[in-house]
Image: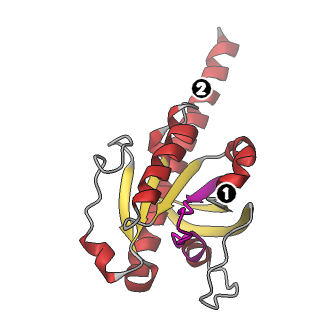
Amino acid sequence: MYTCEFFLWALKSRLSHSSGKTTIANFLSDATENSSGEYRPTQGVRILEFEMQNLNVNNEKLKAEIELWDCSGDHKFEACWPALQRDTHGIIFIYNPSSAHHARDLELLYNYFVTQTGFSHKNCVVFANQMRPADKDLKLSSKMLNISSWVLQVPVSVEESGNRLQADFSSFIASVLGRLRDHSEQEELNIINMQSA
């Protein structure tokens, strides 16, 4: 079984609108926390641990233990960012596509966590949380979001297409696991080759 750490990064708008990150985290992990409908921003980080079964990794079914770090988008926690990224295998950015502030903040976070650190863009995904019916009409584009066009950008909605969100999440986890597995196997081969030389 593989153990992987991922963190969700959502953006807190200057207008205090939520992006729905905690709702998505609870949905993906099957967490049953208080969902009174009242917006309560995440303070620092909240860690959800759960197991995923039957992940299709290179045509092999695997099981993985997932740590999903539900991280606050509030900049008052910026001093914690280096600790949040340590030993992370994947990053899921979540934003509200109807907020121009979220798009700008997403660029800042992408620059900090991916561009500046050399973190692989292949291990990142952007979930555009379509919380209102009007959000479906907004186009997702790497031109609007000044981030790498190689980063997968996915429109999501827990309310209207939860099964699709679960499938997109599983696919992302499986692709990251595949790269981790390939990297681990390559390291083992390198050790064997060094010992036999």
Residue 3 placed where, x, y %?
68, 54
Q: Is 9 placed above or below 17 here? A: above
Residue 42 placed where, x, y %?
69, 68
Q: State which quadrant residue 49 falls in.
A: bottom right
37 displayed left or right of 151: right
Residue 21 part of the magenta-drawn span: yes
Q: Is 6 placed above or below 163 here? A: above
Quarter of the image with the N terminus is bottom right
Q: Secondary structure at mark 1?
A: loop
Q: Residues within 10 Å of mark 1 (few under 14, many from 20)?
A: few
Question: Most extreme residue toward the front, as rendered?
Answer: 15
9 displayed left or right of 101: right
Q: Secondary structure at mark 2?
A: helix
What amino acid type should be assigned to the residue bearing mark 1? Met
Please give the range of residues in magenta.
1-23
Question: Closest to the observer: 121 or 12?
Answer: 12
Residue 38 placed where, x, y %?
62, 86
What amino acid type should be assigned to the residue bearing mark 2? Leu
Residue 72 can be seen, yes or no? yes
The residue tagged 1 is 1
Residue 175 can be seen, yes or no? no
Picture residue at 56% right of the left edge, 73% below the top: 28
Q: Please give the label number shown on residue 134.
A: none
Residue 101 placed where, x, y %?
45, 58
Whole-Å distance between the Cαs marked 1 and 2? 20 Å
Q: Residues within 10 Å of mark 2 (few under 14, many from 20)?
A: few
Quarter of the image with the C terminus is top right
Question: Closest to the observer: 181 or 79?
Answer: 79
Picture residue at 62% right of the left edge, 74% below the top: 29
Q: Please give the label number shown on residue 189.
A: 2
Picture residue at 64% right of the left edge, 91% below the top: 36
Residue 97 part of the magenta-drawn span: no
